[in-house]
Image (spheres, rainbow, N blue to C red):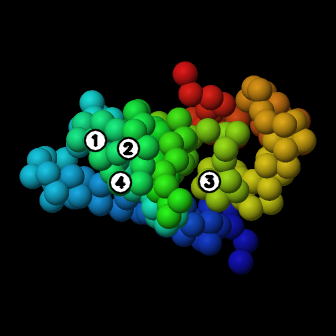
Amino acid sequence: MKRSAGEKNPARANNELSFILSILLLITLCRFGNNFFSGRKAFTAEERFAEMVINRESALLDLSKIKNARNLDNSCPNLFVEELDAVIVSDNGCELKKQGASNWVRFAMGKKMLLNRAEANELEFLSGIGKKRAEEILNLRQNLNGFESMDQLKRLPWMNERIVMEIDRYFTLEEF
């Protein structure tokens, strides 16, 4: 069956819907967790978060409650944790990655994702980008040793201004 120009591929629409529902679930769980464990109302835009990864499971870390990584786990060194940092706890100890929060955590916190750290599935949720195009973007990024400007995306023959604007809406090259 042919689709008109404005119609979306049903499988693509399902993927986009699944992604949006996953993000909403993550935000809801974070808010519920805050309410349940702290007795407070849902978090506000003024609150700051970092990402904590234990056994490859990611969670938001409320920085208003925890000022250093030692409070998280006895094996962690005394580290100062700031917004969008990632605290990775393993059997070998604790590692702090400054501004290392994953793109999905950044997105859930209302921040732009980092294009030079993006994975294919993070690009695929954008309108006009499927699996093949996402891989082409990643290959271009690898060939350039990272993007220095969004205009470099225009080296791809199918990239137009609308898609660049869509990418720019959700991604940035670096955190300012």
| Residue type pointed to by label 4 | Asn
Instruction: Tell which tag, 2 or 3, sits nearer the viewer.
Output: 2
- Is label 3 or label 1 in front? 1
Residue 59 lies, in percent from the top left, at 39, 56
Q: Residue at x 30, y 47 (%)?
A: 71
Label 1 with label 2: CB-CB less than 8 Å: yes
Tell me what residue is drawn at x 47 percent, y 39 percent: 85
Residue depicted at 25% across the width and 36% down the height: 64
Is tag 2's residue or tag 3's residue first in the polypeptide sequence? Answer: 2
Say which element carries label 4: loop
Q: Is residue 167 left or right of residue 28?
A: right
Residue 74: mark = 4
Is residue 140 visible in this depiction of the protein? yes
Q: Disc 3 vs disc 1: Cβ atoms closer than 8 Å? A: no
Q: CA distance from mark 1 to mark 2?
A: 7 Å
- Displayed quadrant of residue 142: top right
Residue assigned mark 3: 122
Q: Amino acid at mark 3?
A: Glu
**How far separated are the C-alphas under marks 1 and 4?**
14 Å
Q: Nearer the viewer, mark 1 or mark 2?
A: 2
Residue 91 % position (x, y):
50, 64
Nearer to us: label 4 or label 3? 4
Residue type at tag 2: Ala
The circle drawn on residue 150 is: none
**Residue 96 position (above or below residue 7):** above
Which of the numbered marks, if any, corresponds to residue 66? 1
For the C terminus, the quadrant is top right
